[in-house]
Image (spheres, rainbow, N blue to C red):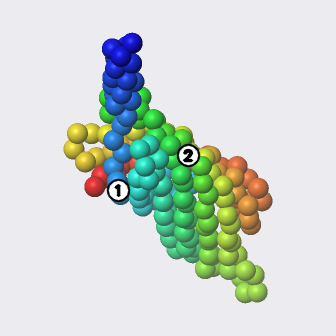
């Protein structure tokens, strides 16, 4: 009986160790998205536990007659697929604002909106401190004309981050 208990404990411990993955305490880099989102964003990830992390993304846009920013925060769960491949899913939200410079007098074309977002992606952790990821982020916005009042937007992005 004692041998069976010891063998079971070792088997459960081995299974737990082999299915665990290493999540970096910190990672910083770029999230290069399509034009449906804000394009390229500065991205920071902070490990919160064994397989949980927080991701913060800041996108800035500037043109000849407009300026804008978008800040997103997501809580993510990470699972190991095979070797250095992980997949993750998360939820969160954010805040964004646009300001237009070429506005006829008396008309305010500044827009501020909030959004909720989901996130699903796959990532590869290299043996060097580099992570490459591809994710899909649907966003449901609440605000002015940019999201056309309760509009659903889909953002696909490639991420490249340095782990430390």
Picture quarter with the C terminus: bottom left
- Residue at image position (55%, 73%) is 67
Whether 99 is drawn above or below 155: the answer is: below
For label 1, the residue is 26
Whether 88 is drawn above or below 32: the answer is: above
Observer-nearest of 118 and 79: 79
Secondary structure found at label 2:
strand
Observer-nearest of 46 and 145: 46
Picture quarter with the N terminus: top left
How many circles with numbers are drawn on the protein? 2
- Relative image position of residue 95 (x, y in whole percent): 61, 66
- Residue 72 found in image quarter: bottom right
Secondary structure found at label 1:
strand
- Relative image position of residue 25 (x, y in whole percent): 34, 54
Q: Seen from this angle, which residue lies furthest left?
A: 128
Residue 90 marker: 2
Evaluate whether residue 32 shows in this view.
Answer: no
| 3D distance between C-alphas at marks 2 and 1 | 17 Å
- Relative image position of residue 97 (x, y in whole percent): 62, 70
């Amino acid at each position: 009986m004692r041998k069976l208990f010891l063998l079971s404990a070792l088997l459960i411990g081995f299974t737990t160790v082999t299915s665990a993955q290493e999540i970096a305490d910190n990672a910083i880099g770029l999230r290069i998205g399509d034009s449906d989102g804000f394009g390229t964003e500065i991205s920071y990830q902070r490990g919160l536990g064994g397989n949980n992390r927080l991701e913060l993304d800041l996108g800035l846009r500037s043109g000849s007659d407009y300026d804008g920013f978008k800040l997103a925060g997501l809580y993510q769960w990470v699972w190991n697929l095979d070797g250095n491949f992980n997949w993750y899913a998360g939820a969160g939200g954010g805040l964004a604002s646009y300001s237009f410079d070429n506005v006829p007098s008396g008309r305010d074309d500044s827009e501020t909106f909030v959004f909720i977002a989901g996130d699903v992606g796959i990532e590869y952790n290299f043996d060097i401190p580099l992570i490459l990821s591809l994710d899909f982020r649907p966003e449901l916005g609440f605000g002015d004309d940019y999201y056309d009042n309760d509009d659903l937007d889909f953002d696909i992005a490639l991420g490249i981050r340095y782990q430390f």
